Image: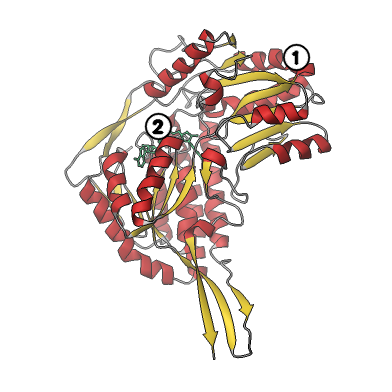
């Protein structure tokens, strides 16, 4: 594909002509070269967004809504192209990439509705001659940075609510996988979004980020990525007091109660775990299984893992693709090495796949009885690693589940409503799935607690993070 930057409605190269290569993780082949945005490009994108903001903010909500609805239709009409870009750049199986595009379409559609539902409130005054109006206004220019694992959905989770609220935006999709987000930018243009309202920069983040964070015209940032980078951005945001939304890492526990069918539970768990090769912030990772069904569950889980077909995501038969790059592959290897040293049992996997010539393939891995102090029990593996440990009673399960700094997603498998309620109430997480590994949808709020960040994306409050409250005291 041809890569470009999208500034003030124009598809441009970098101002100094700089480029970088985009690689296919399935075979390390070069997919193309993309512009490496300069500081000057970044300032131009911010200026374009700042110029476009007043007009877009003043556009009536019904019109903004209609444009976003058309954008949803444009994205749907180009879904095959977008899904192909996602798979080739990120390695995930095509069926999962198609699912990502569907979720993106639904998100634009949902935010098109929400654009018309920014209700104010009237608080009664203390006399007939006063009225207190509470109004919500767009915060201004927003900047967004996102990870590569859902390269289109994560960026759209920022663009759609920002535009619905009346904000303009400067985005920097992950350098590994900008293709889908660039097509979405074209869709927005074709749907009638005025020039400058959406700007997309490509390339390594350092210069872009420094310019964005220092610029007082940028009133808010929204970031999806790791905890260390999130912390750094929160610190940098303090200087110009930008509003901040942080969607950070996870290390999701799964509590498997004694009343479930072990084979069913293992099948659901493995499907959730190995989606996108485990490179999902809400990926189920620490499986805490009641001691009474532990052995049957482990046996079934290992069988599921060993039954998966690894390969290039473009092949229909592929269940699990490669990891994104060598850095990720080495990080996973390091966690496994540490777990081995601490006497954890590697029930299956635990090594690179030798079946491929190039590409970053790692075998689906199941680790049993890893000690609490193993690094993999505390650090987000972001790879195809399932950790299975046992618990004795509900309190013990909840205590173990909450034993990390993360608080994004958590899951419970049980047939008992009482156990489901009790466990969900005790879990420190922004999202809890009961008998379901679906953690996010357009109509539900997604986000973390503890070190997994703050702010929510999607759901009835999808626009909240993009709105400022204004109080007007009306005295007649
Ligand atoms: P990362 O934090 O290293 O990078 C995330 C993105 O931020 C990348 O595109 C990177 O280039 C960019 N980035 C790096 N430094 C930056 C800076 N100074 N300013 C602006 N952007 C910068 O994380 P990663 O390893 O690439 O991604 C995986 C992480 O993302 C995991 O921790 C995962 O859990 C998290 N994630 C969270 C969610 C969520 O919604 N909570 C969703 C997907 C991924």
Q: Viewed as shown, does residue 234 lie left or right of 350?
A: left
Image location (x, y in percent) of residue 161? 50, 56
Q: Viewed as shown, does residue 265 lie left or right of 110?
A: right
**Residue 173 visible in the picture:** no
**Mark 1 and mark 2: Cα distance apart in space:** 38 Å
| In the image, the residue with mark 2 has its CB under 8 Å from the nearest atom of ligand 1 | no
Q: Nearer the viewer, residue 164 or 474?
A: 474
Element under disc 1: helix
**Mark seen at residue 196:** none
User: What residue is rendered at 45% in x and 15% in y?
Assistant: 333
Q: Nearer the viewer, residue 423 or 268?
A: 423
Dot 1: few (<14), some (14–19), or many (≥20) neighbours within 10 Å?
Answer: few
Kindly indicate whether the residue at mark 2 contacts the one at mark 1 (C-beta within 8 angstroms).
Answer: no
State whether residue 344 is above or below residue 258: above
Q: Which residue is mark 2?
A: 89
Image quadrant in which you'd find residue 293? top right
Image location (x, y in percent) of residue 263? 75, 20
| In the image, the residue with mark 1 has its CB under 8 Å from the nearest atom of ligand 1 | no
State whether residue 148 is above or below residue 167: above
State whether residue 245 is above or below residue 58: above
Q: Quadrant of the C terminus?
A: bottom right
**Residue 393 visible in the picture:** yes
State whether residue 273 is above or below residue 41: above
Element under disc 2: helix
Q: Ligand 1 shows up in which quadrant of the image?
A: top left
Image location (x, y in percent) of residue 181? 40, 44
User: What residue is rendered at 83% in x and 37% in y?
Assistant: 418
Q: Viewed as shown, does residue 264 lie left or right of 92?
A: right
Q: Which residue is mark 1?
A: 296
């Amino acid at each position: 594909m041809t890569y470009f930057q999208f500034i003030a409605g124009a598809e441009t190269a970098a101002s100094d002509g700089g480029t970088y290569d985009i690689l296919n993780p399935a075979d390390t082949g070069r997919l193309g070269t993309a512009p490496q945005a300069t500081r000057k490009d970044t300032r131009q994108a911010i200026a374009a967004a700042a110029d476009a903001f007043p007009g877009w903010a003043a556009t009536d909500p019904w019109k903004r809504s209609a444009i976003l609805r058309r954008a949803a239709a444009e994205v749907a009409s180009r879904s095959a192209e977008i899904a192909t870009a996602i798979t080739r750049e990120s390695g995930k199986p095509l069926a999962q990439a198609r699912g990502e595009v569907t979720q993106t379409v639904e998100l634009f559609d949902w935010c098109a509705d929400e654009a018309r539902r920014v209700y104010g409130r009237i608080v009664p005054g203390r006399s007939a001659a006063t009225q207190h109006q509470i109004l919500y206004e767009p915060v201004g220019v927003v900047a967004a940075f996102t990870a590569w694992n859902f390269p289109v959905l994560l960026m759209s989770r920022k663009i759609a609510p920002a535009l619905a609220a009346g904000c303009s935006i400067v985005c920097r999709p992950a350098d590994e996988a900008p293709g889908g987000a660039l097509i979405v930018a074209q869709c927005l243009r074709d749907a009638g979004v005025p020039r400058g309202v959406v700007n997309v920069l490509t390339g390594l983040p350092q210069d872009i980020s420094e310019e964005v964070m220092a610029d007082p015209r940028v009133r808010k940032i929204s970031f999806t990525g790791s905890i260390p980078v999130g912390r750094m951005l929160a610190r940098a945001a303090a200087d110009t007091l930008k509003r901040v939304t942080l969607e950070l890492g996870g290390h999701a526990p799964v509590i498997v109660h004694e009343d479930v069918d072990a084979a069913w539970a293992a099948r659901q768990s493995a499907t959730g775990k190995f989606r996108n090769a485990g490179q999902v912030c809400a990926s189920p990772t620490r499986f805490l299984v009641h001691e009474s069904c532990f052995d049957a569950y482990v046996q079934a889980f290992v069988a599921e893992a060993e039954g998966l077909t690894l390969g290039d995501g473009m092949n229909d038969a592929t269940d699990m693709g490669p990891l994104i790059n060598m850095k990720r592959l080495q990080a996973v290897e390091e966690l496994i090495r540490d777990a081995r040293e601490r006497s954890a049992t590697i029930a299956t996997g635990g090594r690179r796949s030798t079946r491929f010539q190039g590409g970053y393939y790692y075998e689906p891995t199941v680790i049993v009885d890893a000690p609490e102090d193993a690094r993999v029990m505390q650090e987000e593996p972001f790879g195809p690693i399932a950790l299975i440990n046992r618990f004795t009673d509900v309190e013990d399960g909840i205590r173990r589940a909450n034993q990390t700094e993360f608080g994004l997603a958590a899951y419970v498998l049980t047939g008992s409503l009482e156990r489901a309620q009790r466990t969900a109430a005790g879990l420190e997480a922004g999202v809890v799935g009961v008998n379901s590994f679906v953690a996010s949808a357009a109509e539900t709020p997604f986000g973390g607690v503890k070190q997994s960040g703050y702010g929510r994306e999607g759901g009835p409050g999808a626009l909240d993070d993009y709105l400022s409250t204004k109080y007007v005291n009306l005295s007649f």
